[in-house]
Image (spheres, helix red, strand yellow):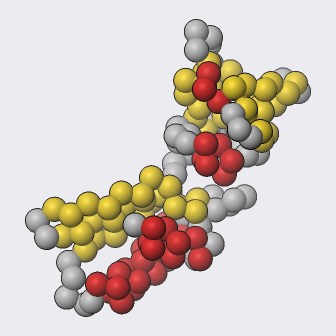
Amino acid sequence: MENIQSFVLKTGYSPLDMKVQVKNDTLRVSFCIYKKDRSISLDDCSKVTLVVRDFLNMLLGKEADFIVDVSSPGADRKLKSWQEFSLFTGKKVRFTRKDEPPIEGTLQSVIEPDKVVFLCDNKEVIVPYGSIVCCQLVL
């Protein structure tokens, strides 16, 4: 899996949610791709799919049975990891903290080791990462 992730990074895209499964002797590789400051199109997904297929053919041989499924992260994606908070800086989000209503703002930055900075109503809001129950991209 790490080989596939490294290979995708070399194409200029960041792989998200990569899953590698084997079922009935068929290898299935599925993941989303992201590229900073750019929406992901069907052409992007097709391009990465073909590149990963060629890589797997080279790695496993032409007789190997596999499926490659590449998609966009989606316009309303829920951020699932610290890495994704870093990737999606500058994007509009809706976030919820424990026992509080959702707030909309722009994801400004992440501060190591555990704080996220949002811009809400022209004010910076610094939130501990552990107190965020949900954070989702919005259109």
Task: Locate the N terminus by quadrant.
Answer: bottom left
Do we see residue 69 in this rendering? no
Q: Quadrant of residue 129?
A: top right
Horizontal and vertical percent for residue 80? 52, 40
User: As drawn, is 100 to the left or to the right of 73?
Assistant: right
Q: Residue drawn at (51%, 48%), measured in percent from left and top? A: 74
Tell me: residue 97, above or below residue 105.
Answer: above
Instruction: Name the outermost residue toward the left.
Output: 24
User: As drawn, is 10 to the left or to the right of 91?
Assistant: left
Q: Nearer the viewer, residue 117 or 136?
A: 117
Q: Nearer the viewer, residue 46 or 96?
A: 96
Do we see residue 91 in this rendering? yes
Q: Residue drawn at (58%, 76%), measured in percent from left and top? A: 11
User: As drawn, is 133 to the left or to the right of 88?
Assistant: left
Q: Residue drawn at (78%, 33%), measured in percent from left and top? A: 117
Q: How many marks?
A: 0
Instruction: Name the outermost residue toward the top.
Output: 99
Tell me: residue 83, above or below residue 80.
Answer: below
Q: Quadrant of residue 125?
A: top right
Horizontal and vertical percent for residue 98? 58, 14
Task: Locate the C terminus by quadrant.
Answer: top right
Horizontal and vertical percent for residue 33? 52, 61
Q: Residue drawn at (32%, 61%), measured in percent from left and top? A: 20
Instruction: Name the outermost residue toward the front.
Output: 113
Tell me: residue 127, above or below residue 117.
Answer: above
User: As drawn, is 53 to the left or to the right of 102?
Assistant: left
